[in-house]
Amino acid sequence: MFWQRNVCMPITRAEMTKLFSAMQAVKKKGTTKKGVKTKRTFGHDPSTRSGEFAGGVEDFGIAQLEKGITSTMRKKVEIERGKDVYLTRKTKNMDCGVYLERGGPSMLISVKSPMTSIDKNVGSRFEEALGDVFTLHEKYPFCVFGFVMTLPMVDHAKKADGTEAGNSINFLKLERFLTTITNRTDTDKDYMKYEHLAFVVVDWDSTPPKIFDTYPKNPDLKFEYFFDKMIATANERNSYAPFSELGIHVGGTDAFGRPCNIQIDPKKFA
């Protein structure tokens, strides 16, 4: 069932275009060698390897969380990028997170922005993603864990002669898989599912970058509503101290269309 937003306004197309234009600038800024400016390519760019490219989404995510957490809980949490989280057997560096002043993480977000070999590496990439979500929910079953991907309209892998192959990506296959590992509602099980997941397809060869609307077909995977959904679910799991005075459910249905009878006066958290 499609989630009905009730936290704040969804991310606008203008905001998304501004974000992706900034990311495109990272990819196009080039390097200078002996006074000659060389053009960087998407698939073989140090910014992709170092995380500088995906860092634009991470900074954007932090800003969305800061904007959305508006209750008195704002003074009791830390909203951080790149913090290590202690799991059962290791530590995991998280791209974005909301951490309780006394306790573990309440919301965590993993960000991926692959540019090459997407169909080829889909199995290993999501094997890693499932391992991450399982080990995290094993330690923090009440944590709201989200996953965001930005994908190019075509694969930017290169051929042997150095030109881009321009291989198409099977977005339908990718979306079908993502749909099976999201919308976790039961904190006692489904450790290998994310609470929320989103992806967006971008034509990086267009200036400004063009958002490819054909995918995702499932509205639950839309980037525009991702951060609202994260905060709404965190509200439901922390009804005694919600993160936002908006999106607190009073009767009706919750973020997943289930009956909800939480009675909270939003004015208490203004």
Image (cartoon, rainbow, N blue to C red):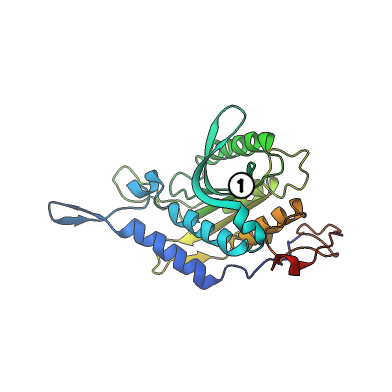
| Quarter holding residue 250 | bottom right
Nearest the viewer among 74 and 262 is 74
> Which quarter shows the N terminus?
bottom right
Residue at the spot 59% in from the left edge and 37% down from the top edge? 132
| Quarter holding residue 9 | bottom right
Residue at the spot 79% in from the left edge and 66% down from the top edge? 265
Instruction: Give the image location of residue 215, x and y in percent.
Output: 59, 60
Nearest the viewer among 248 and 233 is 248
Q: Check disc 1 and report its element: helix, strand or loop.
A: loop
Instruction: Give the image location of residue 227, x and y in percent.
Output: 61, 59
Instruction: Give the image location of residue 228, x and y in percent.
Output: 65, 61
Residue at the spot 65% in from the left edge and 36% down from the top edge? 134
Q: Amino acid at mark 1?
A: Glu
Whether 255 is drawn above or below 9: the answer is: above
Instruction: Give the image location of residue 63, x and y in percent.
Output: 52, 61
Q: Which residue is mark 1?
A: 101
From this viewpoint, which residue is outermost toward the top? Answer: 89
